[in-house]
Image (cartoon, helix red, strand yellow):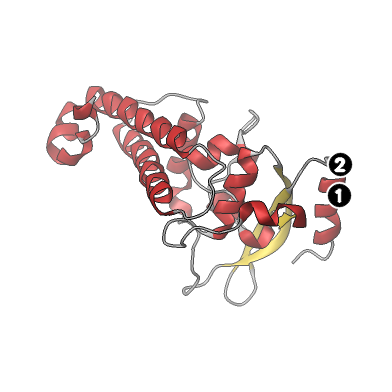
């Protein structure tokens, strides 16, 4: 861990008093503590802050792409504790994503781009990082979802559809299982992802009619209902 991590996180809070949470980037290290130079922590959890010129809407990112907050980098104010409890069942959503979702919906979370932790990559970790070889395609997918580019490449569209479908199902499960008081409009999140699935499927159908109906017959499950 960076020795000045606490000070640097507190500096972010002090510069923006309304913030309730701050997270950061980090280095990747192997089993014996050696730094993995190729990618940073954010690269491998697909938070592309360093690769995009446009400002990222953190709430949109977490509800339409994936969680970008690693619990080990996250610091929250004690005043927010009652708001984030109770946590959902971990089979639906982990605590770090839940906290990030709540704070992002309140527009009260931000980040430091500095590498303030060392994240160990090992065989038995609960949640791993992505394979380096998949970074390029996933970065293209994220740029599309954020509205920063267009694509008609079928393999890329398939990944885009998987991202929307994963979130569509995850937030439906969250809505059906969460026992606490919801402060987030889950119906809106679910509907947005559904609309994005249908939109993507229509582009996929146009891009490669044969693949859409023959190789992946399940892919039109939502488009048939609309």
SS class, disc 2:
helix
140 relative to 30, above or below: above
Position of the N terminus, as image quadrant, is bottom right
The answer to whether residue 20 shows anywhere in this view is: yes
Mark 1 neighbour density, 10 Å: few (under 14) some (14–19) many (20 or more): few
Q: Which mark is residue 15?
A: 2
217 relative to 77, above or below: above
What's the residue at 46%, 53% (across, down)? 178
Position of the C terminus, as image quadrant, is top left
Q: Which residue is mark 1?
A: 11
Q: Which mark is residue 209?
A: none
Point out residue 97 in the picture as x, y percentages from the top left corner.
Answer: 55, 53
Q: As drawn, is 149 to the left or to the right of 30? A: left
54 relative to 5, above or below: above
Point out residue 98 in the picture as x, y percentages from the top left corner.
Answer: 55, 52
Mark-to-mark CA distance, 2 and 1: 6 Å
Point out residue 13 in the picture as x, y percentages from the top left corner.
Answer: 82, 47
């Amino acid at each position: 861990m960076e020795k000045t991590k606490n000070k640097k996180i507190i500096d972010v809070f002090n510069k923006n008093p309304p913030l309730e949470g701050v997270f950061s980037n980090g280095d990747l290290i192997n089993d014996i503590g050696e730094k993995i130079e190729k990618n940073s922590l954010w690269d491998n959890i697909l938070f592309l802050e360093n690769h995009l010129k446009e400002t990222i809407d953190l709430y949109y990112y977490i509800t339409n792409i994936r969680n970008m907050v690693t619990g080990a980098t996250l610091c929250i104010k004690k005043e927010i504790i009652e708001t984030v409890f109770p946590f959902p069942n971990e089979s639906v959503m982990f605590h770090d994503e839940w906290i990030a979702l709540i704070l992002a919906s309140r527009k009260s979370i931000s980040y430091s781009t500095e590498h303030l932790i060392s994240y160990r990559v090992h065989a038995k970790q609960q949640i791993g990082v992505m394979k380096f070889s998949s970074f390029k395609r996933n970065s293209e997918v994220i740029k599309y979802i954020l509205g920063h580019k267009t694509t008609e490449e079928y393999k890329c569209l398939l990944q885009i559809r998987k991202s929307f479908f994963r979130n569509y199902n995850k937030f439906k499960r969250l809505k059906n299982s969460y026992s606490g008081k919801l402060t987030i409009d889950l119906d809106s999140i679910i509907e947005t992802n559904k609309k994005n699935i249908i939109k993507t499927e229509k582009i996929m159908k146009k891009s490669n009619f044969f693949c859409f109906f023959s190789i992946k017959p399940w892919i039109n499950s939502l488009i048939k209902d609309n």
